[in-house]
Image: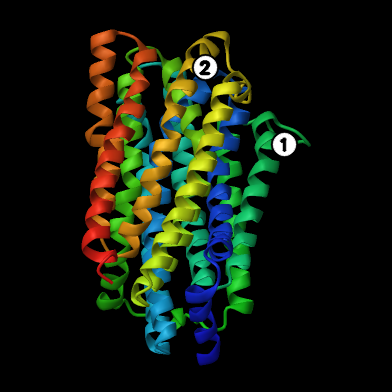
Amino acid sequence: MQQNSQTKENKMGVMPIGRLLFTMSVPMMFSMLVQALYNVVDSIFVSRISEGALTALSMAFPIQNLMISVGVGLGTGINAIVSRALGAKDEKQVQASASNGFLLMAVSGVIFLLLGFILPNAFFRMQTDIGEIIDAGTTYTSIVMIGSFGLFMQMFFERLLQSTGKTMMSMTSQVTGAMINIIMDPILIFGYFGFPAMGVAGAAYATILGQCIAAVVGCTLHTRFNHEVRMKLSRFRPEPQAIQLILKIGVPSIVMMSIGSVMNFLMNQILISFTSTAVAVFGIYFKLQSFVFMPVFGMNNGGVPIIAYNYGAKRPDRMRQTVRYIMIAAISIMSLGTLIFQIFPDKLLALFDASPEMLRMGVPALRTISLNFPIAACCIAMISVFQALGYSMYSMIISLVRQLIVLIPVAFLLAKLTGSVDMTWWAFVIAECVSLACSIYFYRRIRRNVIDVL
């Protein structure tokens, strides 16, 4: 075991940065892309029902994102504590962390189940008075919240597999769930092969079915192959210290990810003042942009341990080289995304059966907002340094700036002062420019005071 650990450490400090970053990032990039598929696939098929149904799913996204944020945040805490205990060969702490992590995930599923009976209808009535959207949104959101136990169990077992380095098994669970969702969506929505046509409800059932099957696959793989992590639930007693350790790491991650839910909700309030079509357009953009951002976030996650290791090894040259590679790769991916959004906006919107009005509004929206992609790439590359060196507050400030502090007030002012939804989209570019200025300031400060003095 010690020799394997040393080999891994040597790889982090010796392997050429380009190849190292590639091997560290690709599994994470793939996992994030798979997660992005669920809501996107639902929306593509639901758009064939009506534009109102598509708008309903766009408005439902903040709640879905909140559930994912809680699951991923808790999973991050579980992963970190279990991995740390494994490294210390503390079997008792491994069991305590895994068992109490299971408890936290289960409690989260129960909380969202209960909220699923009382929250969705009020949530949609806060946003619109259009009956079709309220009914479709309430139906979809209620089902995915009541059935969210599968989502939390899927994430729990995937994180246990990741904590012992079994990333391929974790990806197997994710891919299985995504494929079930893709296959069952049209069957349950439109009623193929003898199934009743359930419309929007069918999309929700396909989602939770995929998540539940992914959870079963993850549990099976964990039980059969993940022998380093054992849970003895028959003897389980909640341990406040283990729960506190998981929450200490998990809560900041939940807060960071939940910012997107708040931004999405507030933007919907601004856009609904124009028309429900504007909300649908924003929903489509938000789903499409995940396929551009997710690979870059995966690369960021892969680069963080490389930067952190070489900081500990006092190798500022490899730290700078890693940041440079992340920057180049991120800008390349994001620039390609911008190019696709600029050239093929109508084709992208056609995936969601866009009406003539949606095309008229959506084409300039996609072209305008996508201008911020290369700018965001630079910010994400610098954020990897903040996370690796423990300056998480800088990352949180930048996230708040780009998604709330600047974006929402500027979007509100542009909407009110110009009366044009086309001008409102420029708020995204303005907010990204401000966050870039903040990122550069923080990065220069860290480089001068931390990296350059090694």
| Residue 188 placement, left or right of 106 | right
How far across and down, in percent of the image, does residue 379 sit? 36, 45
Q: Can residue 110 be seen in this view?
A: no
- In the rendering, at what x and y percent does residue 383 appear? 34, 52
**Res 203 → quadrant:** top right
- Residue visible at 31% across and 33% down? 433
129 shown above or below 223: above
Quarter of the figure with the C terminus: bottom left
413 or 68: nearer the viewer: 413
Q: What residue type is labelled 2?
A: Val
Label 1–label 2 contact, CB within 8 A: no
Name the residue nearer the viewer: 41 or 180. Answer: 41
Disc 2 crowd rating (10 Å Cα; few below 14, some 14-19, many 20+) is: many
- 356 vs 403, left or right, is right
Q: Mark 2 points at which residue?
A: 363
The amino acid type of the residue labelled 1 equals Phe
- The x and y percentages for residue 274 are 36, 12
Q: Which mark, residue 263?
A: none
- Residue 83 lies, with reference to residue 327, above or below; the image says below
Disc 1 element: loop
Task: Report which residue position mark 1 lands on.
Answer: 195
Closest to the observer, 39 or 198: 39
Rate crowding at label 1 as few (under 14), some (14 to 19) or many (20 or more) other CA atoms within 10 Å.
few
